[in-house]
Image: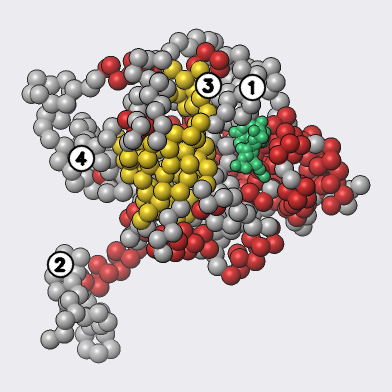
Amino acid sequence: MSDRPVTTTDAGIPAPSDEFSLSVGPNGPLLLQDHYLIQKMAHFNRERVPERVVHAKGGAAYGVLRITEDVSQFTKAGLFRKGAETDLLLRFSTVAGELGSADTARDPRGFSIKFYTDEGNYDIVGNNTPIFFIRDPSKFSDFIHSQKRRADNHLRDNNMQWDFWTLSPESAHQVTFLMTDRGTPASWRHMHGFGSHTFLWYNAAGAKFWVKYHFKTDQGIKNFTAAEADAIVSQDADYHIRDLHTAIKNGDHPSWTVNVQIMPFEEAADYRFNPFDLTKVWPHADYPEITIGRFTLTRNPENYFAEVEQAAFEPANMVPGIGASPDKMLQGRLLSYPDAHRYRIGPNYLQLPVNRPKAPVHTYSKDGPMAFTNPNDPIYAPNSAGGPAADPSIFAGESYQIAGEIIRSAYARHREDDDFVQPRALWENVLSDTDREHLVSNVVGHASAPEVTADMRKRVVEYWTNVHKDLGQGVARGLGLS
Ligand code: NDP
Ligand code: HEM
Protein backbone atom coordinates (compact mmCIF):
# COMPACT_ATOMS: atom_id res chain seq x y z
CA MET A 1 0.00 0.00 0.00
CA SER A 2 1.55 3.35 -0.96
CA ASP A 3 1.51 6.42 1.34
CA ARG A 4 -0.32 8.42 -1.33
CA PRO A 5 -3.92 9.36 -0.50
CA VAL A 6 -6.60 7.76 -2.65
CA THR A 7 -8.19 10.11 -5.17
CA THR A 8 -11.79 10.85 -4.28
CA THR A 9 -14.76 12.36 -6.02
CA ASP A 10 -15.73 15.83 -4.85
CA ALA A 11 -18.10 14.06 -2.45
CA GLY A 12 -15.15 12.30 -0.83
CA ILE A 13 -15.89 8.84 -2.27
CA PRO A 14 -12.79 6.81 -3.35
CA ALA A 15 -12.38 7.20 -7.12
CA PRO A 16 -12.00 4.05 -9.24
CA SER A 17 -9.51 5.34 -11.83
CA ASP A 18 -7.45 8.45 -12.66
CA GLU A 19 -7.27 7.55 -16.34
CA PHE A 20 -9.96 5.19 -17.62
CA SER A 21 -13.62 5.98 -18.24
CA LEU A 22 -16.21 3.28 -17.66
CA SER A 23 -16.82 1.56 -20.99
CA VAL A 24 -18.47 -1.49 -22.55
CA GLY A 25 -15.39 -3.54 -23.30
CA PRO A 26 -12.01 -1.94 -24.02
CA ASN A 27 -13.28 -0.15 -27.15
CA GLY A 28 -16.37 1.46 -25.63
CA PRO A 29 -18.89 3.08 -25.93
CA LEU A 30 -18.92 4.86 -22.52
CA LEU A 31 -21.61 4.49 -19.89
CA LEU A 32 -23.80 7.23 -18.49
CA GLN A 33 -23.40 5.63 -15.07
CA ASP A 34 -19.78 6.87 -14.94
CA HIS A 35 -20.82 9.76 -12.71
CA TYR A 36 -17.18 10.37 -11.81
CA LEU A 37 -16.31 11.13 -15.44
CA ILE A 38 -19.37 13.36 -15.65
CA GLN A 39 -18.33 15.20 -12.49
CA LYS A 40 -14.79 15.77 -13.82
CA MET A 41 -16.00 17.15 -17.14
CA ALA A 42 -18.85 19.19 -15.72
CA HIS A 43 -16.75 20.80 -13.00
CA PHE A 44 -14.01 21.63 -15.51
CA ASN A 45 -16.58 23.48 -17.62
CA ARG A 46 -17.33 25.64 -14.59
CA GLU A 47 -13.76 26.42 -13.48
CA ARG A 48 -13.94 30.06 -14.51
CA VAL A 49 -15.86 32.99 -13.17
CA PRO A 50 -16.02 35.92 -15.60
CA GLU A 51 -12.79 37.89 -15.49
CA ARG A 52 -13.06 41.45 -14.16
CA VAL A 53 -14.39 43.68 -16.97
CA VAL A 54 -11.41 45.95 -16.24
CA HIS A 55 -8.28 45.25 -14.16
CA ALA A 56 -8.53 41.55 -15.08
CA LYS A 57 -4.79 40.76 -14.81
CA GLY A 58 -3.23 41.16 -11.40
CA GLY A 59 -1.64 39.74 -8.30
CA ALA A 60 -2.00 40.31 -4.58
CA ALA A 61 -0.41 39.89 -1.18
CA TYR A 62 -1.43 40.20 2.45
CA GLY A 63 0.13 42.64 4.87
CA VAL A 64 -0.40 44.93 7.80
CA LEU A 65 -0.99 48.67 8.27
CA ARG A 66 0.56 50.36 11.30
CA ILE A 67 -0.47 53.90 12.26
CA THR A 68 2.25 55.98 13.89
CA GLU A 69 0.64 59.44 14.20
CA ASP A 70 -2.43 60.74 15.98
CA VAL A 71 -5.08 61.82 13.45
CA SER A 72 -8.05 61.53 15.80
CA GLN A 73 -8.72 65.27 15.29
CA PHE A 74 -9.56 64.42 11.65
CA THR A 75 -11.21 60.97 11.76
CA LYS A 76 -12.65 58.65 14.36
CA ALA A 77 -11.94 55.59 12.17
CA GLY A 78 -10.43 52.92 14.40
CA LEU A 79 -7.96 51.74 11.76
CA PHE A 80 -6.32 55.19 11.81
CA ARG A 81 -5.96 55.35 15.62
CA LYS A 82 -2.34 55.89 16.66
CA GLY A 83 -0.76 52.50 17.31
CA ALA A 84 -3.50 50.57 15.44
CA GLU A 85 -2.45 47.54 13.41
CA THR A 86 -4.80 46.28 10.71
CA ASP A 87 -4.48 43.29 8.39
CA LEU A 88 -4.90 43.99 4.71
CA LEU A 89 -4.92 42.53 1.22
CA LEU A 90 -3.38 44.59 -1.60
CA ARG A 91 -4.11 43.70 -5.23
CA PHE A 92 -2.16 45.22 -8.12
CA SER A 93 -3.39 45.05 -11.71
CA THR A 94 -3.24 46.43 -15.21
CA VAL A 95 -6.45 47.96 -16.55
CA ALA A 96 -7.17 47.11 -20.16
CA GLY A 97 -5.58 43.70 -20.75
CA GLU A 98 -7.30 40.38 -20.23
CA LEU A 99 -6.48 37.75 -17.60
CA GLY A 100 -3.54 36.40 -19.60
CA SER A 101 -2.18 39.73 -20.87
CA ALA A 102 1.34 41.01 -20.25
CA ASP A 103 2.15 42.70 -16.95
CA THR A 104 4.55 45.25 -18.42
CA ALA A 105 2.17 46.83 -20.96
CA ARG A 106 1.74 50.62 -20.80
CA ASP A 107 -1.31 51.16 -18.60
CA PRO A 108 -2.21 52.64 -15.24
CA ARG A 109 -1.80 50.08 -12.45
CA GLY A 110 -4.60 49.28 -10.04
CA PHE A 111 -3.73 49.56 -6.34
CA SER A 112 -6.65 48.05 -4.37
CA ILE A 113 -6.46 47.67 -0.62
CA LYS A 114 -8.88 45.82 1.61
CA PHE A 115 -8.37 46.64 5.30
CA TYR A 116 -9.94 44.02 7.58
CA THR A 117 -10.75 46.49 10.38
CA ASP A 118 -12.53 45.91 13.71
CA GLU A 119 -15.39 48.03 12.31
CA GLY A 120 -15.80 46.05 9.06
CA ASN A 121 -13.96 46.08 5.75
CA TYR A 122 -12.53 49.36 4.50
CA ASP A 123 -11.55 49.27 0.82
CA ILE A 124 -9.44 51.88 -0.98
CA VAL A 125 -9.61 50.94 -4.66
CA GLY A 126 -7.07 53.27 -6.24
CA ASN A 127 -4.41 53.40 -8.92
CA ASN A 128 -0.71 54.22 -9.16
CA THR A 129 -1.69 57.71 -10.34
CA PRO A 130 -3.43 60.44 -8.32
CA ILE A 131 -5.83 61.35 -11.13
CA PHE A 132 -8.03 59.75 -13.80
CA PHE A 133 -8.96 60.16 -17.48
CA ILE A 134 -12.53 61.40 -17.00
CA ARG A 135 -14.61 63.14 -14.37
CA ASP A 136 -18.11 61.83 -14.98
CA PRO A 137 -19.04 58.12 -14.61
CA SER A 138 -21.33 58.34 -17.62
CA LYS A 139 -18.18 58.33 -19.80
CA PHE A 140 -16.52 55.34 -18.09
CA SER A 141 -17.81 52.51 -20.29
CA ASP A 142 -17.07 54.57 -23.43
CA PHE A 143 -13.56 55.31 -22.19
CA ILE A 144 -12.91 51.65 -21.44
CA HIS A 145 -14.32 50.54 -24.80
CA SER A 146 -11.80 52.84 -26.49
CA GLN A 147 -8.95 51.08 -24.64
CA LYS A 148 -10.18 47.53 -25.19
CA ARG A 149 -10.79 45.64 -28.43
CA ARG A 150 -12.74 46.78 -31.47
CA ALA A 151 -16.15 45.23 -32.00
CA ASP A 152 -15.42 44.22 -35.63
CA ASN A 153 -11.93 42.69 -35.69
CA HIS A 154 -11.18 42.19 -31.96
CA LEU A 155 -7.99 44.27 -32.21
CA ARG A 156 -6.73 46.96 -29.85
CA ASP A 157 -6.66 50.20 -31.79
CA ASN A 158 -4.54 53.25 -30.99
CA ASN A 159 -6.61 55.42 -33.34
CA MET A 160 -9.68 54.73 -31.23
CA GLN A 161 -7.71 55.60 -28.06
CA TRP A 162 -6.53 58.95 -29.43
CA ASP A 163 -10.00 59.64 -30.77
CA PHE A 164 -11.47 59.33 -27.28
CA TRP A 165 -8.62 61.20 -25.57
CA THR A 166 -8.49 64.13 -28.00
CA LEU A 167 -12.27 64.52 -27.80
CA SER A 168 -12.03 64.40 -23.98
CA PRO A 169 -9.51 67.09 -23.00
CA GLU A 170 -10.04 66.29 -19.30
CA SER A 171 -7.96 63.17 -20.01
CA ALA A 172 -4.77 65.20 -20.65
CA HIS A 173 -3.40 65.03 -17.10
CA GLN A 174 -3.76 61.27 -16.77
CA VAL A 175 -2.56 60.61 -20.32
CA THR A 176 0.55 62.70 -19.55
CA PHE A 177 1.31 60.43 -16.56
CA LEU A 178 0.55 57.36 -18.65
CA MET A 179 2.90 58.38 -21.45
CA THR A 180 5.83 59.04 -19.10
CA ASP A 181 7.84 56.06 -17.95
CA ARG A 182 5.50 55.83 -14.94
CA GLY A 183 3.14 54.16 -17.43
CA THR A 184 5.55 51.20 -17.44
CA PRO A 185 6.60 50.60 -13.80
CA ALA A 186 9.52 48.20 -13.28
CA SER A 187 7.61 46.36 -10.58
CA TRP A 188 4.55 46.80 -8.42
CA ARG A 189 6.93 47.24 -5.49
CA HIS A 190 8.50 50.30 -7.10
CA MET A 191 5.45 52.49 -7.66
CA HIS A 192 3.27 54.70 -5.49
CA GLY A 193 -0.42 54.13 -4.82
CA PHE A 194 -3.14 56.76 -4.54
CA GLY A 195 -6.72 56.75 -3.28
CA SER A 196 -7.13 59.24 -6.17
CA HIS A 197 -10.59 60.48 -5.12
CA THR A 198 -11.25 62.97 -2.39
CA PHE A 199 -12.95 61.32 0.60
CA LEU A 200 -14.72 62.65 3.69
CA TRP A 201 -13.18 62.21 7.13
CA TYR A 202 -15.06 63.16 10.29
CA ASN A 203 -13.96 63.02 13.89
CA ALA A 204 -15.79 61.88 17.03
CA ALA A 205 -17.20 65.39 17.57
CA GLY A 206 -18.56 65.48 14.00
CA ALA A 207 -15.98 67.95 12.55
CA LYS A 208 -15.44 67.22 8.85
CA PHE A 209 -12.43 67.27 6.54
CA TRP A 210 -11.67 66.26 2.96
CA VAL A 211 -8.81 63.83 2.52
CA LYS A 212 -6.61 62.39 -0.23
CA TYR A 213 -4.44 59.28 0.28
CA HIS A 214 -0.87 58.91 -1.04
CA PHE A 215 0.95 55.61 -0.56
CA LYS A 216 4.63 56.30 -1.24
CA THR A 217 6.79 53.34 -2.11
CA ASP A 218 9.66 52.78 0.35
CA GLN A 219 11.49 50.86 -2.38
CA GLY A 220 11.83 54.03 -4.51
CA ILE A 221 10.28 54.66 -7.91
CA LYS A 222 11.66 52.45 -10.70
CA ASN A 223 10.29 52.41 -14.22
CA PHE A 224 11.03 50.63 -17.45
CA THR A 225 11.66 52.53 -20.65
CA ALA A 226 9.22 51.64 -23.41
CA ALA A 227 11.86 49.42 -25.04
CA GLU A 228 12.59 47.56 -21.79
CA ALA A 229 8.90 47.02 -21.07
CA ASP A 230 8.25 45.79 -24.61
CA ALA A 231 11.15 43.34 -24.43
CA ILE A 232 9.75 41.83 -21.22
CA VAL A 233 6.32 41.41 -22.80
CA SER A 234 7.85 38.75 -25.05
CA GLN A 235 9.99 37.18 -22.29
CA ASP A 236 7.63 36.90 -19.35
CA ALA A 237 4.00 37.99 -19.49
CA ASP A 238 3.76 37.45 -15.71
CA TYR A 239 6.81 39.50 -14.80
CA HIS A 240 5.14 41.61 -12.10
CA ILE A 241 3.26 38.76 -10.44
CA ARG A 242 6.51 36.78 -10.34
CA ASP A 243 8.48 39.74 -8.96
CA LEU A 244 6.10 40.34 -6.05
CA HIS A 245 5.66 36.67 -5.23
CA THR A 246 9.41 36.01 -5.31
CA ALA A 247 10.28 39.05 -3.19
CA ILE A 248 7.80 38.09 -0.47
CA LYS A 249 8.81 34.42 -0.59
CA ASN A 250 12.42 35.51 -0.04
CA GLY A 251 11.48 37.65 2.97
CA ASP A 252 12.00 40.92 1.09
CA HIS A 253 8.81 42.59 2.29
CA PRO A 254 7.85 45.73 0.38
CA SER A 255 6.34 48.67 2.25
CA TRP A 256 4.63 51.98 1.55
CA THR A 257 4.51 55.11 3.70
CA VAL A 258 0.94 56.30 4.19
CA ASN A 259 0.52 60.04 3.63
CA VAL A 260 -2.62 62.13 3.56
CA GLN A 261 -3.53 65.60 2.38
CA ILE A 262 -6.23 67.16 4.53
CA MET A 263 -8.51 70.04 3.55
CA PRO A 264 -10.83 71.63 6.12
CA PHE A 265 -14.42 70.99 5.00
CA GLU A 266 -15.32 74.66 4.42
CA GLU A 267 -12.32 75.36 2.14
CA ALA A 268 -13.67 73.15 -0.66
CA ALA A 269 -16.26 75.66 -1.87
CA ASP A 270 -13.72 78.39 -2.75
CA TYR A 271 -10.61 76.34 -3.46
CA ARG A 272 -8.93 77.44 -6.71
CA PHE A 273 -9.46 73.98 -8.24
CA ASN A 274 -12.58 71.87 -7.82
CA PRO A 275 -11.26 69.58 -5.08
CA PHE A 276 -13.63 66.77 -6.12
CA ASP A 277 -12.57 66.71 -9.77
CA LEU A 278 -10.71 63.44 -10.27
CA THR A 279 -8.61 64.86 -13.11
CA LYS A 280 -6.88 67.24 -10.66
CA VAL A 281 -4.46 66.93 -7.76
CA TRP A 282 -4.29 69.26 -4.79
CA PRO A 283 -0.92 70.98 -5.24
CA HIS A 284 1.37 70.32 -2.28
CA ALA A 285 1.97 74.03 -1.73
CA ASP A 286 -1.73 74.30 -0.79
CA TYR A 287 -2.09 71.01 1.11
CA PRO A 288 1.17 69.32 2.10
CA GLU A 289 1.32 65.58 2.63
CA ILE A 290 1.28 64.39 6.25
CA THR A 291 2.72 60.96 7.12
CA ILE A 292 0.45 58.86 9.33
CA GLY A 293 1.87 55.34 9.11
CA ARG A 294 3.15 52.57 6.90
CA PHE A 295 1.97 49.25 5.49
CA THR A 296 4.06 46.23 4.64
CA LEU A 297 3.28 43.19 2.51
CA THR A 298 4.33 40.01 4.28
CA ARG A 299 2.47 36.99 2.93
CA ASN A 300 1.63 35.49 -0.45
CA PRO A 301 -1.82 34.04 -1.12
CA GLU A 302 -1.84 30.23 -1.32
CA ASN A 303 -4.78 29.80 -3.69
CA TYR A 304 -4.78 32.34 -6.52
CA PHE A 305 -8.36 31.69 -7.58
CA ALA A 306 -9.88 31.76 -4.10
CA GLU A 307 -7.87 34.67 -2.75
CA VAL A 308 -7.10 36.88 -5.75
CA GLU A 309 -9.54 36.07 -8.56
CA GLN A 310 -12.46 36.04 -6.11
CA ALA A 311 -11.26 39.05 -4.12
CA ALA A 312 -13.93 41.74 -4.29
CA PHE A 313 -12.92 45.33 -3.66
CA GLU A 314 -15.56 48.03 -3.45
CA PRO A 315 -15.18 51.77 -2.85
CA ALA A 316 -18.53 51.65 -1.02
CA ASN A 317 -16.89 49.78 1.87
CA MET A 318 -16.25 52.69 4.21
CA VAL A 319 -16.09 52.47 7.99
CA PRO A 320 -17.36 55.01 10.58
CA GLY A 321 -15.19 58.15 10.42
CA ILE A 322 -14.92 57.93 6.61
CA GLY A 323 -17.52 58.85 3.99
CA ALA A 324 -18.03 59.64 0.32
CA SER A 325 -17.33 63.02 -1.23
CA PRO A 326 -19.44 64.52 -4.02
CA ASP A 327 -16.81 63.41 -6.60
CA LYS A 328 -19.14 62.16 -9.37
CA MET A 329 -16.74 59.36 -10.30
CA LEU A 330 -16.66 58.08 -6.74
CA GLN A 331 -20.45 58.28 -6.56
CA GLY A 332 -20.71 56.13 -9.69
CA ARG A 333 -18.20 53.62 -8.36
CA LEU A 334 -20.12 53.18 -5.11
CA LEU A 335 -22.81 51.43 -7.11
CA SER A 336 -20.74 49.73 -9.79
CA TYR A 337 -18.42 47.44 -7.80
CA PRO A 338 -20.84 45.46 -5.60
CA ASP A 339 -23.01 45.09 -8.70
CA ALA A 340 -20.00 43.65 -10.56
CA HIS A 341 -19.25 41.24 -7.69
CA ARG A 342 -22.81 39.92 -7.51
CA TYR A 343 -22.60 39.14 -11.22
CA ARG A 344 -19.00 37.92 -11.34
CA ILE A 345 -18.76 35.92 -8.11
CA GLY A 346 -22.32 35.67 -6.83
CA PRO A 347 -24.51 37.46 -4.29
CA ASN A 348 -22.79 35.83 -1.32
CA TYR A 349 -19.27 36.92 -2.32
CA LEU A 350 -18.84 38.52 1.10
CA GLN A 351 -19.01 35.09 2.74
CA LEU A 352 -15.84 33.90 0.98
CA PRO A 353 -12.83 33.85 3.33
CA VAL A 354 -10.90 36.53 1.39
CA ASN A 355 -13.81 38.97 1.45
CA ARG A 356 -15.36 38.07 4.77
CA PRO A 357 -14.90 40.85 7.36
CA LYS A 358 -12.90 39.98 10.46
CA ALA A 359 -15.43 42.07 12.41
CA PRO A 360 -18.56 40.16 13.44
CA VAL A 361 -21.34 40.30 10.82
CA HIS A 362 -24.92 40.82 12.06
CA THR A 363 -26.76 41.30 8.80
CA TYR A 364 -30.38 40.68 7.89
CA SER A 365 -29.36 39.42 4.42
CA LYS A 366 -30.43 35.81 3.98
CA ASP A 367 -29.77 32.79 1.77
CA GLY A 368 -29.02 32.92 -1.98
CA PRO A 369 -26.58 30.79 -4.01
CA MET A 370 -23.77 29.22 -1.98
CA ALA A 371 -24.85 30.77 1.33
CA PHE A 372 -23.12 28.98 4.17
CA THR A 373 -23.17 31.33 7.14
CA ASN A 374 -26.01 31.04 9.60
CA PRO A 375 -28.24 34.11 9.27
CA ASN A 376 -29.72 33.62 12.79
CA ASP A 377 -33.36 34.20 13.63
CA PRO A 378 -35.15 36.55 13.65
CA ILE A 379 -34.31 37.46 10.06
CA TYR A 380 -36.26 40.70 9.89
CA ALA A 381 -36.06 44.13 11.49
CA PRO A 382 -37.57 45.61 13.51
CA ASN A 383 -38.11 42.62 15.78
CA SER A 384 -38.96 42.12 19.41
CA ALA A 385 -36.65 39.14 19.84
CA GLY A 386 -33.44 41.00 20.65
CA GLY A 387 -32.00 40.84 17.12
CA PRO A 388 -29.37 43.33 15.94
CA ALA A 389 -30.42 46.99 15.91
CA ALA A 390 -28.79 49.70 13.76
CA ASP A 391 -27.06 52.62 15.48
CA PRO A 392 -28.15 55.95 13.90
CA SER A 393 -25.43 57.85 15.80
CA ILE A 394 -22.82 56.26 13.50
CA PHE A 395 -23.99 58.39 10.58
CA ALA A 396 -24.17 61.64 12.56
CA GLY A 397 -20.73 63.02 11.61
CA GLU A 398 -21.22 62.19 7.95
CA SER A 399 -24.21 64.40 7.23
CA TYR A 400 -23.96 67.79 5.56
CA GLN A 401 -26.18 70.17 3.58
CA ILE A 402 -26.45 69.96 -0.21
CA ALA A 403 -29.03 71.83 -2.29
CA GLY A 404 -29.47 72.50 -5.99
CA GLU A 405 -31.43 72.03 -9.16
CA ILE A 406 -31.56 68.56 -10.76
CA ILE A 407 -29.56 68.90 -14.01
CA ARG A 408 -27.06 67.17 -16.31
CA SER A 409 -24.00 69.40 -16.43
CA ALA A 410 -20.25 69.73 -16.12
CA TYR A 411 -18.94 70.65 -12.66
CA ALA A 412 -19.36 74.33 -11.81
CA ARG A 413 -16.03 75.98 -12.62
CA HIS A 414 -13.61 76.94 -9.84
CA ARG A 415 -11.21 79.89 -10.40
CA GLU A 416 -8.27 78.00 -11.93
CA ASP A 417 -10.05 74.97 -13.37
CA ASP A 418 -8.58 74.15 -16.75
CA ASP A 419 -7.81 70.76 -18.27
CA PHE A 420 -4.24 71.59 -19.18
CA VAL A 421 -2.89 73.64 -16.29
CA GLN A 422 -1.88 70.68 -14.10
CA PRO A 423 -0.33 68.50 -16.83
CA ARG A 424 1.52 71.67 -17.87
CA ALA A 425 2.85 72.03 -14.30
CA LEU A 426 3.98 68.40 -14.47
CA TRP A 427 5.86 69.07 -17.73
CA GLU A 428 7.28 72.43 -16.66
CA ASN A 429 8.15 71.89 -13.01
CA VAL A 430 8.39 68.20 -12.23
CA LEU A 431 9.65 66.14 -15.17
CA SER A 432 13.41 65.91 -15.77
CA ASP A 433 14.85 66.41 -19.26
CA THR A 434 15.05 62.63 -19.67
CA ASP A 435 11.42 62.24 -18.50
CA ARG A 436 10.36 64.81 -21.09
CA GLU A 437 12.30 63.11 -23.88
CA HIS A 438 10.72 59.78 -23.01
CA LEU A 439 7.25 61.32 -22.77
CA VAL A 440 7.63 62.68 -26.30
CA SER A 441 9.03 59.45 -27.72
CA ASN A 442 6.38 57.32 -25.95
CA VAL A 443 3.59 59.47 -27.41
CA VAL A 444 5.20 59.39 -30.84
CA GLY A 445 5.60 55.61 -30.65
CA HIS A 446 1.97 55.15 -29.64
CA ALA A 447 0.57 57.56 -32.27
CA SER A 448 2.79 56.06 -34.98
CA ALA A 449 0.85 52.79 -34.96
CA PRO A 450 -0.27 52.11 -38.54
CA GLU A 451 -3.97 52.39 -37.70
CA VAL A 452 -3.60 56.00 -36.48
CA THR A 453 -4.79 58.19 -39.34
CA ALA A 454 -3.08 61.35 -40.63
CA ASP A 455 -5.99 63.44 -39.39
CA MET A 456 -5.78 61.83 -35.95
CA ARG A 457 -2.05 62.56 -35.76
CA LYS A 458 -2.80 66.27 -36.27
CA ARG A 459 -5.30 66.09 -33.42
CA VAL A 460 -2.66 64.37 -31.27
CA VAL A 461 -0.23 67.25 -31.90
CA GLU A 462 -2.92 69.79 -31.03
CA TYR A 463 -3.73 67.92 -27.78
CA TRP A 464 -0.11 67.96 -26.64
CA THR A 465 0.40 71.57 -27.76
CA ASN A 466 -2.42 72.47 -25.38
CA VAL A 467 -0.42 70.89 -22.57
CA HIS A 468 2.79 72.70 -23.59
CA LYS A 469 4.03 74.11 -26.87
CA ASP A 470 7.45 72.41 -26.53
CA LEU A 471 5.74 69.09 -25.97
CA GLY A 472 3.48 69.69 -28.98
CA GLN A 473 6.50 70.58 -31.11
CA GLY A 474 8.38 67.47 -29.99
CA VAL A 475 5.42 65.26 -30.88
CA ALA A 476 4.93 67.04 -34.23
CA ARG A 477 8.60 66.52 -35.09
CA GLY A 478 8.46 62.86 -34.09
CA LEU A 479 5.36 62.29 -36.21
CA GLY A 480 6.94 64.10 -39.17
CA LEU A 481 4.39 66.91 -39.00
CA SER A 482 6.71 69.90 -38.61
P1 NDP B 1 5.28 69.33 -6.18
O1 NDP B 1 6.58 69.67 -6.80
O2 NDP B 1 5.04 69.67 -4.74
O3 NDP B 1 4.97 67.78 -6.33
C1 NDP B 1 5.27 67.11 -7.50
C2 NDP B 1 4.83 65.68 -7.34
O4 NDP B 1 5.12 64.98 -8.53
C3 NDP B 1 5.47 64.92 -6.22
O5 NDP B 1 4.43 64.22 -5.55
C4 NDP B 1 6.42 63.95 -6.90
O6 NDP B 1 6.51 62.87 -6.04
C5 NDP B 1 5.69 63.71 -8.21
N1 NDP B 1 6.55 63.33 -9.32
C6 NDP B 1 7.89 63.47 -9.47
N2 NDP B 1 8.29 63.02 -10.66
C7 NDP B 1 7.19 62.60 -11.30
C8 NDP B 1 6.95 62.01 -12.56
N3 NDP B 1 7.96 61.76 -13.39
N4 NDP B 1 5.69 61.70 -12.89
C9 NDP B 1 4.67 61.95 -12.04
N5 NDP B 1 4.84 62.49 -10.82
C10 NDP B 1 6.08 62.81 -10.46
O7 NDP B 1 4.19 70.03 -7.10
P2 NDP B 1 2.61 70.15 -7.04
O8 NDP B 1 2.00 69.49 -5.87
O9 NDP B 1 2.31 71.58 -7.26
O10 NDP B 1 2.20 69.33 -8.34
C11 NDP B 1 2.76 69.67 -9.61
C12 NDP B 1 2.38 68.56 -10.56
O11 NDP B 1 2.96 67.35 -10.07
C13 NDP B 1 0.87 68.30 -10.60
O12 NDP B 1 0.24 69.12 -11.55
C14 NDP B 1 0.82 66.86 -10.93
O13 NDP B 1 0.89 66.69 -12.33
C15 NDP B 1 2.10 66.27 -10.33
N6 NDP B 1 1.83 65.52 -9.09
C16 NDP B 1 1.23 66.13 -8.04
C17 NDP B 1 0.83 65.40 -6.95
C18 NDP B 1 0.05 66.04 -5.86
O14 NDP B 1 -0.67 65.32 -5.18
N7 NDP B 1 0.18 67.34 -5.64
C19 NDP B 1 1.08 63.96 -6.87
C20 NDP B 1 1.83 63.43 -7.97
C21 NDP B 1 2.15 64.20 -9.05
P3 NDP B 1 7.32 61.51 -6.32
O15 NDP B 1 8.60 61.85 -7.00
O16 NDP B 1 7.48 60.88 -5.00
O17 NDP B 1 6.37 60.75 -7.18
C1 HEM C 1 -12.13 47.36 -11.16
C2 HEM C 1 -15.85 50.05 -12.62
C3 HEM C 1 -13.22 54.05 -12.07
C4 HEM C 1 -9.73 51.43 -10.05
C5 HEM C 1 -13.34 47.75 -11.65
C6 HEM C 1 -14.41 46.86 -11.98
C7 HEM C 1 -15.45 47.60 -12.37
C8 HEM C 1 -15.04 48.97 -12.32
C9 HEM C 1 -16.83 47.11 -12.78
C10 HEM C 1 -14.34 45.34 -11.88
C11 HEM C 1 -14.67 44.93 -10.47
C12 HEM C 1 -14.64 43.43 -10.29
O1 HEM C 1 -15.20 42.72 -11.13
O2 HEM C 1 -14.08 42.96 -9.26
C13 HEM C 1 -15.46 51.37 -12.58
C14 HEM C 1 -16.32 52.49 -12.87
C15 HEM C 1 -15.57 53.62 -12.74
C16 HEM C 1 -14.24 53.20 -12.33
C17 HEM C 1 -17.79 52.39 -13.27
C18 HEM C 1 -15.92 55.06 -12.91
C19 HEM C 1 -17.13 55.51 -12.86
C20 HEM C 1 -12.06 53.71 -11.44
C21 HEM C 1 -11.11 54.63 -10.90
C22 HEM C 1 -10.12 53.89 -10.33
C23 HEM C 1 -10.46 52.49 -10.51
C24 HEM C 1 -11.24 56.14 -10.94
C25 HEM C 1 -8.89 54.32 -9.58
C26 HEM C 1 -8.75 55.49 -9.02
C27 HEM C 1 -10.10 50.11 -10.18
C28 HEM C 1 -9.29 49.04 -9.69
C29 HEM C 1 -9.97 47.86 -10.01
C30 HEM C 1 -11.18 48.25 -10.69
C31 HEM C 1 -7.95 49.14 -8.98
C32 HEM C 1 -9.53 46.45 -9.70
C33 HEM C 1 -10.05 46.03 -8.35
C34 HEM C 1 -9.39 44.74 -7.94
O3 HEM C 1 -8.17 44.76 -7.70
O4 HEM C 1 -10.10 43.72 -7.89
N1 HEM C 1 -13.74 49.04 -11.89
N2 HEM C 1 -14.22 51.83 -12.25
N3 HEM C 1 -11.64 52.42 -11.19
N4 HEM C 1 -11.23 49.63 -10.77
FE1 HEM C 1 -12.71 50.71 -11.51
Task: Decide which of tag 1 and tag 4 comes sooner along the chain.
Answer: 1
Q: For the residue labelled by badge 4, is the local secondary structure a helix, a strand or a loop?
A: loop
Please tell me whether mark 1 or mark 4 is closer to you in this view.
1
Report if the beta carbon of the residue with label 4 is closer than 8 angstroms to ligand 2: no
Amino acid carrying label 3: it is Met
Please tell me whether mark 2 or mark 1 is closer to you in this view.
1
Check residue 263 in the rendering and tell me which mark sits there, or answer none: 3
Please state the horizontal and vertical placement of residue 311, each as a whole percent of the image: 37, 48
Provide the residue designation for mark 4: 367
Please tell me whether mark 3 or mark 2 is closer to you in this view.
3
Near-viewer residue (264 or 274): 264
Please tell me whether mark 1 or mark 3 is closer to you in this view.
3
Amino acid carrying label 2: it is Gly
Provide the residue designation for mark 2: 12
Provide the residue designation for mark 1: 273
Amino acid carrying label 4: it is Asp
Amino acid carrying label 1: it is Phe
